[in-house]
């Protein structure tokens, strides 16, 4: 497959402990609520800068609560 | 459909009503109310508050009720508020109960419902801090849809419907004036909060 599938970020709210690394790494896709828990933008991630940053955010997740899913 | 009537109702109980019946007619069939209703909570604790002026005409049909006043019948329980009752006070009591009943698994529910309860407790007690109501409206939007389950969605839905239905009464609370709804009887109080879930 030459073309990469479109993806989006998802959070598992039970696992998430609000470390907030994701919002530091990719603030265009993740902001934090008043208590430090992630609010994900509904943006679809195409190839490009954002895609790389989203992958880094997922790789950095301390509680394995963030994932990239294909849509 | 089956409808459970409680609160300010002469003969509370379970009634079989025709789909699409007007709530006023059902209330009359239940012997009416002890005092003119100040509103009602339709659909139980995850339901919606309907103000008194819309109550009699409320159609007991899920689709029509939703399109007419954005409410739903949920579990079919309707609790009628007595004349001296306050929807803000009762909605806050329910919110506090639902906050204590959270499974406490997700950050937005644990933090959000707790913060909402604390701010609403101040508002209901007419001791609101500046900006409390703005925070409540913002947090209600912030919390919605972000739990693993829909417990927080139902809890904030009940609250938002109360703020809409009793919006004309809110200035009394925000101005720090006493509200007699605290001492009103006749609306079923939530059970005392137990230990946290499990």
Image: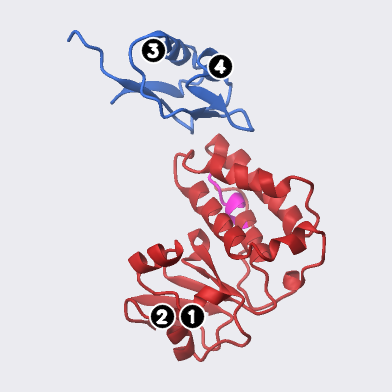
Circles 3 and 4 on the same chain: yes
Helix, strand or loop at disc 4?
A: helix
| Crowd around label 3: few <14 · some 14–19 · many ≥20 (10 Å) | some
Q: Which residue is mark 3?
A: A51
Which subunit holds the residue at mark 3?
A: A
Mark 4 vs mark 2: tell me if same chain: no
x and y percent of residue A31 in the render? 55, 25
Cα–Cα gap, marks 3 and 4: 16 Å
Image marks 2 and 1: residues in contact by CB distance under 8 Å: yes
Q: In the picture, which chain is blue?
A: A
Q: Are marks 2 and 3 on the same chain?
A: no
Region of the chain picked out in magenta, as a range: B97-104
Contact between labelled residues 4 and 1, with CB atoms less than 8 Å apart: no
Q: Closest to the observer: B127 or B149?
A: B127
Q: Is residue B88 above or below residue B15?
A: above
**SS type, badge 3:** helix
**Cα–Cα span, label 3 and label 1:** 55 Å
Pinpoint the chain carrying mark 4: A
Residue designated by label 1: B56
Badge nearest the viewer, 1 or 4? 1
């Amino acid at each position: 497959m030459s073309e990469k599938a479109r993806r989006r970020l998802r959070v598992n709210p039970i696992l998430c402990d609000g470390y907030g690394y994701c919002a530091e790494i990719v603030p265009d896709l993740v902001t934090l609520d008043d208590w430090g828990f992630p609010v994900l933008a509904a943006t679809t991630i195409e190839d490009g800068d954002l895609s790389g940053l989203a992958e880094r955010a997922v790789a950095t997740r301390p509680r394995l609560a963030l994932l990239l899913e294909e849509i | 459909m089956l409808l459970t009537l409680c609160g300010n109702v002469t003969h509370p109980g379970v009634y079989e009503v025709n789909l699409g019946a007007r709530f006023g007619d059902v209330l009359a069939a239940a012997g009416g109310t002890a005092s003119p209703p100040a509103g009602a909570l339709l659909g139980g604790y995850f339901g919606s508050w309907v103000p008194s002026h819309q109550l009699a005409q409320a159609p007991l049909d899920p689709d029509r009720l939703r399109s007419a006043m954005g409410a739903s019948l949920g579990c079919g329980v309707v609790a009628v508020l007595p004349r001296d009752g306050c929807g803000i006070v009762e909605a806050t009591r329910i919110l506090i109960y639902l906050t204590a009943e959270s499974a406490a698994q997700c950050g937005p529910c644990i933090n959000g419902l707790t913060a909402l309860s604390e701010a609403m407790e101040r508002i209901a007690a007419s001791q609101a801090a500046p900006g409390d109501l703005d925070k409540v409206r913002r947090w209600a939007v912030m919390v919605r849809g972000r739990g693993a389950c829909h417990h927080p969605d139902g809890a904030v839905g009940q609250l938002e419907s109360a703020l809409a239905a009793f919006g004309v009464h809110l200035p009394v609370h925000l101005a720090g004036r006493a509200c007699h709804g605290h001492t009103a009887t006749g609306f079923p109080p939530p059970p005392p909060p137990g230990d946290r879930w499990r």
